[in-house]
Every structure is written in structure tokens, then in C-alpha cells.
Image (cartoon, grey):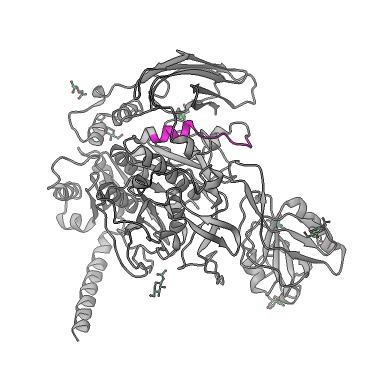
Amino acid sequence: MKTSKNNLLFLFINLCIIAVQISASHAEEERKPYIVYMGELPEDRKFLIDEHHSLLSKTIGDELIARNSKIHSYGRSFNGFVAKLLPHEAEILSKKEGVVSVFQNKVQKLLTTRSWDFLGMPLTVRRKRETESDMIVALLDTGIWIQSPSFNDKGFGPPPAKWKGKCMKAGNFTGCNNKVIGAQFFKLQNDGQEEEKSPADSDGHGTHTASTAAGNSVHGASLYGIAEGTARGGVPSARLAIYKICWIMGCTDMDILAAYDAAIADGVDIISVSLGGYPRDLFEDPIAIGSFHAMKKGILTSCAAGNDGPDLETIENVAPWILTVAATSIDRRFEAPVTLGNGENFTGIAINTFEPKERMYSLTNGAHAQNISGNPVGNISACDYGTLNQNKVKGKIVYCLGNGGQDLIIGELGGAGIIMSNEFTTDIAFPNLIPGTFVSVNDGEKIDKYINSTRSAQAVISKTITAYMTAPFVASFSSRGPQTLSSNILKPDIAAPGLDILAAYSELTTMTAEQGDKRIVKYNIISGTSMACPHASGAAAYVKSFHPDWSVAAIKSALMTTAKSMKIKPVGAELASGSGQINPRVALHPGLVYDIQYDNYISFLCGQGYNKSAIAMLTGNKKYNCSSFPVAKGADGLNYPSIHIYLNNSKTSFSEIFYRTVTNVGIGKSVYRASIRSPKGLSVTVVPKILTFDSPNQKRSFKVMVKGKFLRESSWVLSGRIVWSDSKHNVRSPILVFRS
Ligand SMILES: *[C@@H]1O[C@H](CO)[C@@H](O)[C@H](O)[C@H]1NC(C)=O
Ligand SMILES: *[C@@H]1O[C@H](CO)[C@@H](O)[C@H](O)[C@H]1NC(C)=O
Ligand SMILES: *[C@@H]1O[C@H](CO)[C@@H](O)[C@H](O)[C@H]1NC(C)=O
Ligand SMILES: *[C@@H]1O[C@H](CO)[C@@H](O)[C@H](O)[C@H]1NC(C)=O
Ligand SMILES: *[C@@H]1O[C@H](CO)[C@@H](O)[C@H](O)[C@H]1NC(C)=O
Ligand SMILES: *[C@@H]1O[C@H](CO)[C@@H](O)[C@H](O)[C@H]1NC(C)=O
Ligand SMILES: *[C@@H]1O[C@H](CO)[C@@H](O)[C@H](O)[C@H]1NC(C)=O
Ligand SMILES: *[C@@H]1O[C@H](CO)[C@@H](O)[C@H](O)[C@H]1NC(C)=O
């Protein structure tokens, strides 16, 4: 009785709100959400929300509209708010005192077991369990399927004392535990989708990335027996804090900032962000802004580099305080071979979970299975929807040209399998709804010829097997540098496995999330820089568990200067892999680090042309301007662990100086010598060539003169490196000169 009355009341309030929204929506037709970013928090936060209101109503000129237009105030870790504005109001606001930037809310996208062994971190790797279990790794993603064995809290004590976060138990999310100590969701504005509002992962992506960064060790994990082994994260004893910000429609800027606002104040150690989408100015980018405030508190953000490779200048998430992570292969590949009736075999690449039931199946192609009575519009050899005759497909394997997706069509027609060929499928193993595989264009032509040559063509597609191969190489899809925002900083920073990664998955979705797929899986194999990013996050947490007092830049430097170079290394490889593939065990003892303090970043921003008012807001002190933060000397003005020259406008010769300072993080006395490797045309001089340290934490400075000339009109990149070595450590920095 009581419940139903409450329900009625609730319904009534809801109706009122809807009515208000309808009447208001007319006047607000063109208002769109903008983020008003105001930099550091003021010392006194009591009037923060009032200030947001007053700023808004002065701009809009109407108290009521101003009140209705505000969506959210940030104020736990930085200052700012979100409001629905007209373009001219946004313009006015951007010029107001106290405002760093105003930008329209956009939607970003997700950048879709053996990997840790491959990285030289076997199960038995030395760990600091006490401090590792105090590490809190935050994921800004699609939520989590906490029921996965990867997140079981058996053996975990209560959350570390520093933890101040929340757990939002709702819907399919059954509540936190001592492994997943926090879980929140952020959806500041309704996007019209009827999705359950809870931290539960209905997509699988967030569960996958969380378990890669910090999942438990789970024996016997596999996808239908494929990739069987122990699935685990980089820091299995660490805790997870989940911030769900990605929904069916994507991940909005305002929600990303809300998650940062919370995560920094909650006391996390590392933030893992496997998403991106728009190249833009640093302070109009929620990930750059959020990670800037996180960096100030010693929290490293690791980000996916983007999936728009192999084209150049596609890299995302390039702020110098972010660890930008490219995706590499590990030393195995998933093959689903094809055997034809004539005994010939072909290597196919795919995640094929289906064991063939028969020795051989009839084989056909689009041309032979064409629906002649119909009047098909579409590409017959690509098996487009509506072009094939069901009777000629049923029970057969069909060969189709194309990029994938035809498995659904052939499956609906009752086909027994599909062989696809295209020029793009070179490295990723994709899943299919029916037995299926991808072959090269060359092999595809041979298969097609065989089909044409006989009336009784036959084939069988094997279940996926694991093949071993030379690695690492950078995945084709991984976004490439150079970046143009702060053009003498090399990005990506580093590379980590992101190709065909097995990790935990959500049981609220299916293996492919395609219509008709009934395969609910505990572990799934997917690819993307999204998968590389949490490997780097886990590695960063591992380093931090040994060195809890290290700055963000010191951890980055340790990971970068100890990284391994690619086994397969095309010209300009650094634009794809940065310093190389993470090598976490060696990163514990880098010998020297290139440290960067908060003030150095402010100086850097001054050098980039950020003006007085922006600097004052970022630092939270009105008295500060760029004369308080002298711009550092040198071509990049930042003590970065890599060296990069971006040559604009078809210049062919160059001459730049880079100033660097290294800090001794070794045990004590040591002597480091510089060695240089450089190709013809590139001259690198280091002064001094020897650095002597008497004690830990001592700093030594040197300069690097990079001069040269592109000798051929067609050459566009010159790469070398500088290595500082004592008897135990090799501290490597790539040097890359790029000509646009
Ligand atoms: C969550 O749980 C309910 C049933 O309790 C179900 O109807 C819903 O579809 C579930 N899945 C998601 C993704 O919300
Ligand atoms: C093709 O593979 C099958 C199964 O692995 C094997 O028995 C056969 O000998 C192979 N054929 C050729 C021509 O290599
Ligand atoms: C052939 O195409 C026609 C027209 O689109 C369709 O009605 C018919 O069902 C198709 N026949 C088969 C056997 O798929
Ligand atoms: C059909 O699709 C394939 C693969 O996408 C393409 O190579 C071919 O040119 C297309 N044919 C026609 C007639 O459009
Ligand atoms: C097989 O036959 C079809 C239809 O006649 C034709 O389009 C295709 O090019 C042939 N394939 C090869 C490899 O000759
Ligand atoms: C290259 O030069 C053009 C034209 O001078 C300029 O607009 C652009 O910003 C420059 N790019 C970089 C990365 O410096
Ligand atoms: C500082 O830069 C912002 C954005 O580029 C601009 O709107 C503002 O007018 C500038 N302020 C000063 C004092 O130059
Ligand atoms: C910048 O700060 C210095 C020292 O605080 C001050 O003397 C100077 O007037 C300031 N410059 C501007 C342009 O405000």
C-alpha cells in the first residue's frame, strides 16, 4: 500500500519534470552543453557553486534560464561547470575572468595472459605485496562485471586507508568487494537511451581493460580453449576503482571530467583511460585537463594512442604529462587454417571457436551461389545482403571478398562457414558468428580459382590454433605520430601489447555483441590500443609499488628509458612505438630518471604561448604569470625522456639544442657514459659525455646538439638514439627528426 502510493508520487514528480522540460525546451532549442573550465580550485570552496551560478546568470542575463541551463558543477579536484549555452554565450563566458576555456561537449569513443609473460613478468616475478595491495588503479571505461573470477576478493584485506571513494550498488551491479573497492557511474545528461544506470558493464570493454591492468591471476582461462593459460593483470594484488563513463552512445567530455573530478579526490594512484577521439587544444580536452590535475597530485594517467593507424599524424591523447601508449603484438598469432578438398592448405587469421563437425563441407562463392531469380542490388562476390540464393548456400562454406561482417548474412542463410579475403586483414584475429576465417588476397584468389575449376569443391575451416612468431611489432591499427600540438615532443611514448589480448569479459553481453550470437564468455580475445593502455597502467602501478614517492614524470621516464626496441622495425618506427615496448621488471631500476615537476610543465605551457590569465587559473594563484615561470631553454623546453624535432615546411636542414637533467635513482656512486647511434645525415653531440654521481638523488645536466640534413629529397625521417650507461643500467632515449 505504502509502496504504491510512493510510486504514484514518484510518477507525478517525474511527470511535472517532464512538463517543465517540454515548456523550457522550446526556448532552449539551440542550447548545447558546454564545459566551462576554470582551472585550479580556489582555497575557499564554500562559494564555488554560487560563483558558477552568478557567472552563468550574468552571461545569460536571465536568472531562471541560467538556473535551468546548468547541468553540473565540478569542484572536488578542479574548478568548472557544465551548462547548456548558445554559441554567443559560450563566447562571452570564455572571455570572463576566471575562465580558462569553454568548449562544446563532444562524444569520444572506446579504442577498442601470455602478454605479461611476454613482457618478462612471469607469475613468479618479484613483487612488493604490501605496497602493491595499497595501489589503487582507476579505470574510466564501460564499468565492470564484478562477478568475474578476475575480481574475486579472496585473500584481500580492507581497502587502503587513503581510499575516499564510493560504491554505487544498483541494478546488475551487485556491490563492491575488497578487490573492486569503488564503482561509480557518471551520466550527467540523459542521451535518450534506455540503459540501466549502474556501474555494471554491459559492453565487456571495461571488464577487459580492468582485468588487464589489475585482475587476479586466474588459472585455466581461455576462450573456448583458445589462448589457454593464466589470465592476470600487471598488479594482481592491487585494488580497482571503477568509473563508468561510456554508454551505448559513447563517452561524453562532461562525464569524463566528472570521473576525473571524483577519482583524484578519491585517492587513486594510476588512471587508465582507453578512449579518445578528437585532436584539440590541451585545455579544451577533458582527458588533458583531468590528467593535468591528476599529475599535480602525483597520479599518472595512461592513455590509448588511438586506432587510426597506420597513417601518420593520427595520434591522440598527446599532453606531455600523459603516458601515451601504442599497441604491439605479442609472440603469438591466432590462425584458423583452411584445407581444400584437393588437399591444399591456407593460413587464415581469425578467432574461430567452432570445431568442425564434418571432415569436409561443400564450398561455393558469391558468383556460384547468386540468386538469379531475384534482382540483386549489391556486390555478389562480396556476398552482399540479398544477392545470394539460400538453397545454394545452405550447409556450405562460402568464399566472399570483403572486410568482414558477411558472417551474419551467410549465417542467416544457413551457411556452414565463411572464408573472407581482403587486403586489410594482416594482423588482427577477428571473431565470426559462424565458422570463419580471413585469408590474404593472394590465397583468396587461389581458393576462388579452385571453386571455379570443379563442380564438387570442398573445404573445412579448423578451429583456431596458436602459432608463434617474431615479436614485437606495432599493430597496423595503432595510431602514429608525429603530433602537432606541441610539436617537439615525441608521441606515442611507449608501446604495450594490444593485439589479440585475452582478458575477462562481461556476461551481460556476448562474445561479439552481434545479433544472433549466443556465446556468453568469461574471457574474450580483443584488439586495440584500448588493450595496450591498461598494460602500461599495470606496469606503472608495478613501478609505483616499489617507488611510492616517485613523480608521474619519474615513473614515465623509468618505463620509457628501459623499453625494448621493436623486433620488426620499419623506417621511422619511433612514430609508431615511441621509446619501445614496456619492460616493467627493468623499469624498477632505471638508474637515472628524467624528472619533471609541476612548475616545469607550467613553464612549458608559457613557452607554448598560454597567456597570463590561463596560467593564473591553472595554478590557482592570481599573482602568477609567465614571468614567475621562466621558459626552459632548448628546442622543447621540457626535460622529456625522448628527443624529437618536427621540421615544418619542407626544410631539409636542422640544428637544435636540447637541455636535459637526470636524477640518480641508483644506489650511490656511479659513472655514466653517453653513447650515440645516428645514421648518415644526423649529427648528435652530447656535452658532457660523462656524468659522475656521488650519491642517490643527485642531479646532473647535459645538453644534446642535434644537427643535420636530409640527404635525399624523398627521405622524411632520421632516427638515432642516445644511451647513458654505467655498469648496470642502460638509459635509452630515441632521437627522431621528422620532416613534414
Ligand atoms: C540487468 O538486469 C535485468 C534483470 O535483472 C535485465 O533485464 C537487464 O537486461 C540486465 N542487463 C543490462 C545490460 O542492464
Ligand atoms: C594440410 O593440412 C593437413 C592437416 O594439418 C595435413 O594433413 C596435410 O598434409 C596438409 N596438406 C599439405 C598439402 O600440406
Ligand atoms: C531470391 O530473391 C528474391 C527477391 O529478392 C527473394 O524473394 C527470394 O526469396 C530469393 N530466393 C532465395 C532462394 O534466396
Ligand atoms: C566487390 O567488393 C570487393 C571487396 O570489397 C571489391 O574488391 C570489388 O571491386 C567489388 N566489386 C564491385 C563490382 O563493386
Ligand atoms: C571465378 O568465377 C567468377 C564468376 O565467373 C569470376 O567472377 C571470378 O573472377 C573467378 N575467379 C577467378 C580467381 O578466376
Ligand atoms: C607548420 O607551418 C604551418 C604554416 O606556417 C603552420 O600553420 C602549422 O601550425 C605548422 N605546424 C607545426 C606542427 O608547427
Ligand atoms: C588569454 O588567452 C585566452 C584564450 O586564448 C583569450 O581568450 C584571452 O583573451 C587571453 N588573455 C590575455 C590577457 O591575453
Ligand atoms: C607578472 O608577475 C610579476 C611578478 O609577480 C609582476 O611584477 C608583473 O607585473 C606581472 N606581469 C603582468 C603582465 O601582469
Q: Residue 735: percent from the left, percent from the top?
A: 52, 25
Q: Residue 692: percent from the left, percent from the top?
A: 41, 16
Farthest residue, direction bottom:
1
User: How many marks can you see?
Assistant: 0
Q: Nearer the viewer, residue 540 or 198?
A: 540
Residue drawn at (54%, 65%) of the image: 511
Visible residue check, residue 719: yes
Question: Magenta stretch?
Answer: 555-569
Farthest residue, direction right:
454
| Residue 710 location, quadrant | top right
Q: Residue 178: percent from the left, percent from the top?
A: 33, 58
Q: Nearer the viewer, residue 380 or 123?
A: 123
Q: Give the side of residue 434 with respect to residue 484, left or right.
A: right
Quadrant of the displayed image that contains ligand 8: top left
Q: Is residue 559 magenta?
A: yes
Q: Nearer the viewer, residue 475 or 588?
A: 588
Residue drawn at (64%, 65%) of the image: 407
Image quarter hosting the C terminus: top right
